[in-house]
Image (tube, rainbow, N blue to C red):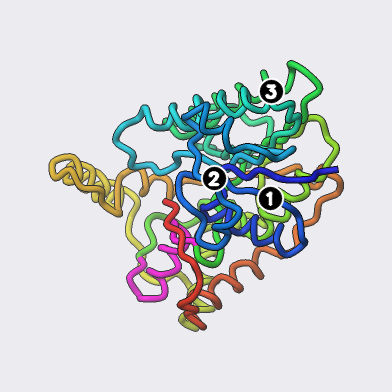
Amino acid sequence: MVKKITIIGGSGFVGTNFCRYLDSINKDFEIIDLKLSNQFSEKCKIGDVRDLQSLRNTITGDVVVNLAAIHRDDVRDKSEYYNTNVVGMENICSVCSEKKITKLIYTSSVAVYGFVTSCTDENGKIEPFNEYGKTKFLAEEKLRSWQAKGNNSLIIVRPTVIFGEGNRGNVFNLFNQISTGKFLMIGSGKNKKSLAYIENVVAFLDACVVSNQKYGLYNYVDTPNMTMNDFVSLVRLKLKGKKGVGLRMPYFFGVFIGFVADITAFLSGRNLSISSIRIKKFTASTEFSSSKHELDGFVPPYKLNLGITKTLESEFSSRNLDKEIFFTE
């Protein structure tokens, strides 16, 4: 039976929501993070996955959930990805072995698959296109080596894009652009996107904690996968009462603007909200499937449409000024 859960990176968006859930069902947990948790400061210890001794001093749980990562796509020093995602994982595995902690849960990413051209399951080819995806997979390999060395349990979760109340990532930016009338569809909009609602991700992480599986690898996706046309149309209807996607820009012109932004960012030394890679990611199909139901018959508590509706109502109807905001991308 799990007595205490150590959540590394627990002060971030996923971590805070996971801790809220654990707190609501009276499960004991501790947070280890570079920054103090705003909501659970009494349970938070300052620690750094890149510092082995820091982890030795702070980890006291009997299950470790690692949410820590460098994930932004505009990090200039590429070594930061390796130091946090890979060396950090090596350190976590070392401390778990020293302290005889035999269960680890890791949030990896569907970024390990790179640009996918069809619906991709957990057996998809590993072809990451950036340092984030590469180092996430290298971290998985470190974990698989750790799991094979003894009576250890490991569950790796590869979420797709996570959205929800309080998240200020790409999905919120899209919602906000639609809400303010600044959105412009690029390309045909027929490309499909997979999404993951935060409260479902949290429920799945808890299912991983209590599961007796020795090894598991799961994409996390909420279905059905939607085309960008369908997704934008749904959001516009709920926010603006308007049908369709509105104005549309040809793909080639959008990519050209992205390259101009790349050059501008390079010459000015500033990070811009638009780039060629972000345009390509927006217009690409990132469609995944998941075997999550194989984890003890897991059923997500919310349908995808309901998760979208709950997020829109929280962010744009009530405008709850007291909720904590997380800038994740």
**Residue found at x 86% / y 49%:** 297
Task: Answer with left or right where residue 209 lies relative to residue 242.
Answer: right
> Which of the 4 quarters of the picture holds residue 163?
bottom right
Q: Amino acid at mark 1?
A: Phe
Q: Is residue 299 visible?
A: yes
Residue displayed at 51% across by 52% down: 12
Q: Which residue is mark 2?
A: 9
| Quarter of the figure with the N terminus | top right
Residue at x 41%, y 63% (from the top left corner):
173
Report the residue at 67% width, 35% height from top. Answer: 156
Q: Amino acid at mark 3?
A: Ser
Q: In the image, which disc is placed on residue 301?
A: none
User: In the rendered view, would you say 62 is above or below 316?
Assistant: above
Q: Secondary structure at mark 3?
A: helix
* C-alpha distance separating marks 2 and 1: 13 Å
Residue receiving disc 3: 97
Q: CA distance from mark 3 to mark 1?
A: 20 Å
Foreground of the two, 224 or 206: 206
* Residue 192 appears anywhere in the view: no
Residue at which label 1 appears: 29
Q: Is residue 267 left or right of residue 31?
A: left
**Crowding at label 1, few (<14), some or many (≥20) Cα neighbours within 10 Å?**
many
